[in-house]
Structure formats: C-alpha cells, structure tokens
Amino acid sequence: MKRFDKEIQKLDSSSFDLSRSRINWSHVTQDLIESEFSKVILEARSNKYPFSLYCAVNDATENEVTVQLSSGANKTGVIEKVKTAEMESVTCEIEKGSALVASFGSTGSVAFIIYPYKSERYSRTEDNIILHSSLSPDSVNEKLIKSCIANYLFYIRCSSIYGAHSFKSSFRDKLRMNWLLFRDIRNRRKIYRKFYTACIEWGKIIGAGIAGYIVAILTKGA
C-alpha cells in the first residue's frame, strides 16, 4: 500500500547508512584510532613521559566497541600507617581511572570521552568530559584523533596530584579546562536551559514594565 512506501524507503535508507557505518568502523576507523593511540604510546616512552600509557580494545559485543588509551595508576606519595595493639598496616594511596575512550555504539555513531585521575584526597568534580558525540565514522580522521589525544594529555596533568600545582597557578590552563567543560554537550544543554529560563523571566519583567508604562500613558491622557 502507498501509505507504507515512504516509511519503507526511509527504513531502507537508514539501514543502509547503519550498515555502512559499521563496515567503515570495523575496516577503517577503528584501525586508525588504534594506530594513533599506539603512536602516542611509543612517543611517550621515547620521551620518558612520567605516566605509563597503554591501549586496550573491548570488542566482546558485536557492533559495540571501545578503543581505550589509558594512563596507569600512580602512587600519590601519601602513606597511611596504622598501628594498634592487634595489628600494623601501611597503605599507599594511588590515583587511577584516567582514560581516553573512543566508543562505537550500536546506532553507528562514535564518541570520544576523557576520564580524569581520581584519588581519595584529590579529584575533580566531574566524572568525565565528552569531547565529541554522535560522530559518523566518516568524520573521524587523524586530525580529530590527535586533537582528542592532546586534550587527554592535558586532562591527565590537570587531574593528577602531580599536575595540581601547575594547573592552579596557570590562568591559561583554567581557561582551556573551562572550554573543554563547555564543549561537553551535557553542560551546554544546562547552560541553554538556564539561558532560556532567564529569558522567560526577563520577558515577564519587561512585559510587565511595558504594560505598566502603557497604562500610565493612557491614564495620563485621560
């Protein structure tokens, strides 16, 4: 029936795009991401970068894959010693959890998310920052991946206890961090909602003012 023709056409087109995205990811995009992650790992080692970088791929679920560039756990230098009549123990605090995750979802879209270092005594308030979301695998190129890596290395330093002093004393770093937070689509939505609400409230105030002005003019004219 004709009522189904348009819907069938759109479903066929969407299914084709999804299949093409999955093929592109598995044959091109994933390999490109892994290659760029491997390059930065080798570069870090050759330059004696203080943090240990490594890459891991999680492809246990078909058509849902993550390629992860992670930085290993670090001792923070905080050592807690407990001594009682019953026992003695020494605990070394560590920071961990830092990663740049390239995620390919079931809908055929790609996201890049960075996670900070966290420890019991020092951690950032946000759990992560979404650098990019809902990307087509076609849009993921070498330049974009390198930009994500650069932002991740910056995030490592700022979230690690070893980079805390340089971050707090650098106005430029704070500006860059605020820009990354603003780029996160979740934060932008919050800002847009607040702006929309503020506009409505100001509209009410201005509207009431205009109405009062008109009434005053009419009353004066009478």
Image (cartoon, rainbow, N blue to C red):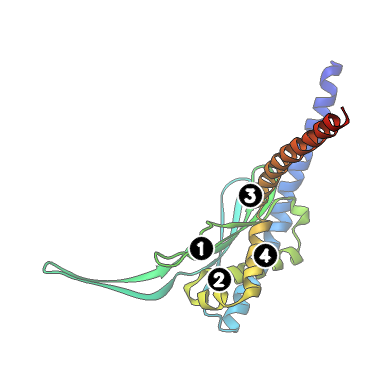
49 and 92: which one is in front? 92
Secondary structure at numbered mark 3:
helix
Quadrant housing residue 14: top right
Whether pointer 1 and pointer 2 mark residues with C-beta atoms closer than 8 Å, the reply is yes
* Amino acid carrying mark 2 in the image: Cys
In the rendering, at what x and y percent does residue 117 appear?
Answer: 50, 66
Between the residue at mark 4 and the residue at mark 2, the CA separation in whole angstroms equals: 15 Å
Between the residue at mark 1 and the residue at mark 4, the CA separation in whole angstroms equals: 19 Å
Between the residue at mark 4 and the residue at mark 3, the CA separation in whole angstroms equals: 18 Å
Q: Which residue is mark 3?
A: 186
Secondary structure at numbered mark 2:
helix
Please name which of the two marks, 4 or 3, marks the residue nearer to the observer. 3
Please name which of the two marks, 4 or 2, marks the residue nearer to the observer. 2
Name which residue lies at 77% across and 45% down. 20
In the rendering, at what x and y percent does residue 110 appear?
Answer: 68, 52
* Amino acid carrying mark 3 in the image: Arg
In the rendering, at what x and y percent does residue 219 appear?
Answer: 83, 29
- Pointer 1: residues within 10 angstroms few (<14), some, or many (20+)? few
Q: Which residue is mark 2?
A: 158
Quarter holding the C terminus is: top right
Q: Which residue is mark 1?
A: 124
Q: Between disc 2 and disc 3, whose residue precedes?
A: 2
* Amino acid carrying mark 4 in the image: Cys
Q: Left or right: 134 with respect to 74?
A: right
Query: Is residue 51 shown to the viewer in this render?
Result: no
57 and 221: which one is in front? 221
Q: Left or right: 216 with respect to 40?
A: right
Q: Between disc 4 and disc 2, whose residue precedes?
A: 4
In the rendering, at what x and y percent does residue 32 appear?
Answer: 71, 63
Name which residue lies at 80% across and 26% down. 7
- Pointer 3: residues within 10 angstroms few (<14), some, or many (20+)? few
Q: Between disc 4 and disc 3, whose residue precedes?
A: 4
